[in-house]
Amino acid sequence: MLGRALAPELYAAGQTETLLLALPSRIGPPWLGHLLEAIVAAGAFSAFMSTTSGLLVAVAGALAHDVYARMLNPRTSSRGQRLAFQLAALLAGMIAILAGVQVERFAINLLVGWAFAISATSFFPLLTLGIWWKRLTLPGAMTGMIVGGISASVAVLATMYLAPLEVGVAESLVWTLLAQPAIWAIPIAFGTMVGISWLTADQVPVDINLKLLRMHVPEQLGLQTEYIRE
């Protein structure tokens, strides 16, 4: 409402991002506008810094603890794990900075959509089948995640560097599908998980029924492992 009343030219042009930044300076006297601009800037910085730092810690912790300490060097000491965490944080931060420079020219709403598309094509089929389908196997889950995530990532990269329009959305059907990969990559991920799981049916855990039972039945019923065995 304030944007439409105080900055109608930006509102009519659909420049919502610019509108949010310009609106504080148009409310009240100049000193109040500057104060509101500072508050908006501080809130924006605190928001993306907290999110970025949390993701950086999660990535570095996974690389240092799960990849390095468990797979590459299981006999490492706590000091070695701490050093691996620090190096992983530097490496992940550098990669994130380089990736951020590459996507600077794209609108934030498009980048958010791409991030959700990659997450949906890799994690959504895994969560859905892992919770509701008892024939899912480890090879099927891993292959489906890899195929879905790589499919969406390749489509996003193709849109970024090969699409004829700057925003990455072209008029043709092919480029539209590449710019919105979730609509076709999610079914591919589901199909891959189901197909590979059928081919590796002998690797289904023997206690899968018990796992699904404990996952879906309320805890108040007391259906624990010891109770079922008795």
Image (cartoon, grey):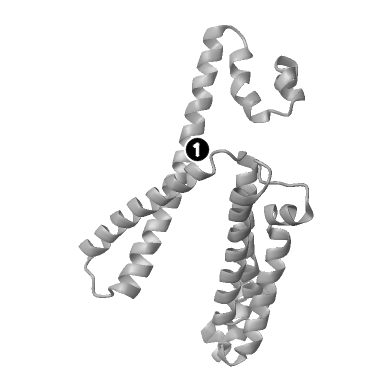
Nearer to the camera, 33 or 8: 8
Q: Is residue 15 in sight in this rendering?
A: yes
- Say which quarter of the image contains residue 224: bottom right
Q: Position of residue 24 (x, y in %)?
A: 59, 18
In the image shown, does 18 or 76 lie closer to the viewer? 18
Residue 119 drawn at (x, y percent): 59, 59
Establish if 76 lies above or below 172: below
Figure label count: 1
Residue type highlighted by circle 1? Ala
Q: Quadrant of the C terminus?
A: bottom right
Residue beneath the point at 54% across and 43% down: 103
Query: Is any part of residue 206 visible from this angle?
Result: no
- In the image, what residue occupies the spot 37% across and 69% down? 67
Instruction: Give SS at disc 1.
Output: helix
Image quadrant where residue 66 sits: bottom left
Q: Reply above or below: 136 against 58.
A: below
On the image, the x and y values in percent for residue 167 come to: 66, 41
Q: Which residue is mark 1?
A: 47
Q: Position of residue 145 (x, y in %)?
A: 58, 70
